[in-house]
Image (spheres, grey):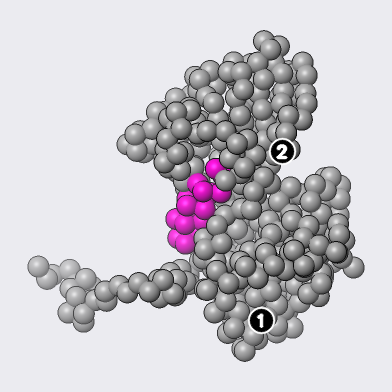
Amino acid sequence: MSNIKDKSLHKLGQDKMDWAFAHMPVLSSIYKRFEKEKPLAGLNVSLSIHLEAKTANLARTIRAGGATVYVTGSNPLSTKDDITAALVRDGFEVNAIYGADQKTYEEHLVETLKISPDIVVDDGGDLVSLLHTTLKHNAVNVMGGCEETTTGITRLKAMEKEGKLNFPMMAVNDAKLKYLFDNRYGTGQSVWDGIIRTTNLLAAGKNVVVAGYGWCGMGVAMRSKGLGANVIVCEVDPIKALEATAEGFQVMTMDEAAKIGDFFITVTGCRDVIRKKHFLSMKDGAVLCNAGHFDVEINIVELAEVATDVKEARVNITSYTMPSGNKVNLLAKGRLVNIAAADGHPIEIMDLSFAVQALSVEHIVKNQKNLENKVYDIPEEIDVFVASYSLQNMGCKIDTLTDEQVQYMDSWDES
């Protein structure tokens, strides 16, 4: 039985889903094929991704393929209650509530796995973790799954290295269409959407500190620069740090950056990136936010401990007064600012990512007998199909190699 906040919100949620689906041509084409061919007939799928309109359309596409889908969110502050209402109205089993406490959030994960899934679609690794620990008895039918995030892939590869991964997983996050577009362009735009909606502050002329220069950090830095900000990058990888300097960004330690930053954005996948000593040296009015999967990149416990006063300055802004009298402002409780305080990545970006997700689910079903308990890269043909269809829908044509060019590229002795 579903556990959501308010079933009466279904109309608003359905409108959002319909709007998103109208701008998701690749996923729409897969939906139509799945509806006709039923490649997932009779399968049970447990799905945990940031639960909003675009995700709902992924769930609908998987169901169109013949599967029974149980749905939950992957973060309490990213769940949209109107979307859960629309999904329940549409016949889905949904367990997710915006702002749920940790106990309720974990209960929702458990409910989603009671279906004893054949396929798991995960975002951050919470479902997979449960299926390897307290809910092993619900993993008896699992033929494989997909993981959407950098954080989740890191956890999966650690499990694989230790020989503890009990079923194959597709690294959707490592697909080219995921990290080149979703992580870079999607994160870059949606993070600033969340910041601007929440603070209504100007970015131009400000010092923006980006912690982490992976694909997500690249996107955030690029959009920050486009808004006229002075971009400072903090990194632990010398190659990535050097790359940031080549893009014209300042590179320094967080100890240095903490003293001059106006906005701080963490996108590392690690914990305690900004902590007590940094809070104490920040300027009055500094704004902190996180775009990593878990709310551990900014040490919120230490922030509260060092503060002399804490108050809600505005919706989704918690203001902490430091012993110096300076105020440090945390957005969205340190959760993913781009979805906890906004609508997540642009629709067209998630059309690409969720098309890859849907086709990866189908790939597992078709190839289950040949898959070992490993983390697999997404087959290139999936990336190529999704990119080609998207270009076609945009009216873009590209060149193709002639037979002679193919032969030239495949040979070593022609000049």
Residue visible at 55% across and 57% down in the picture = 346
Residue 404, image x, y percentages = 17, 79
Q: Could you tell me how far apart the alpha carbons at marks 2 and 1 are, in whole angstroms?
A: 38 Å
Q: Which residues are magenta?
A: 175-192
Residue, disc 2: 316
Looking at the image, is 336 positioned above or below residue 49?
above
Along the line of sight, which residue is nearer the eye, 205 or 139?
205
Q: Residue 46, position in %: x, y?
A: 74, 67
Q: Residue furthest left?
A: 415
Residue at image mark 1: 65
Q: Check the picture and name the quadrant holding the C terminus.
A: bottom left
Q: In front here: 87 or 124?
A: 87
Q: Quadrant of the N terminus?
A: bottom right
Give the number of the mark in front: 2 or 1. 2
Q: Is residue 257 left or right of residue 388?
A: right
Q: Which quadrant of the view contains residue 284? A: top right
Q: Is residue 76 magenta?
A: no
Residue lying at 82% horizontally and 45% vertically, measured from the top left: 102
* Above or below: residue 266 compared with residue 95: above
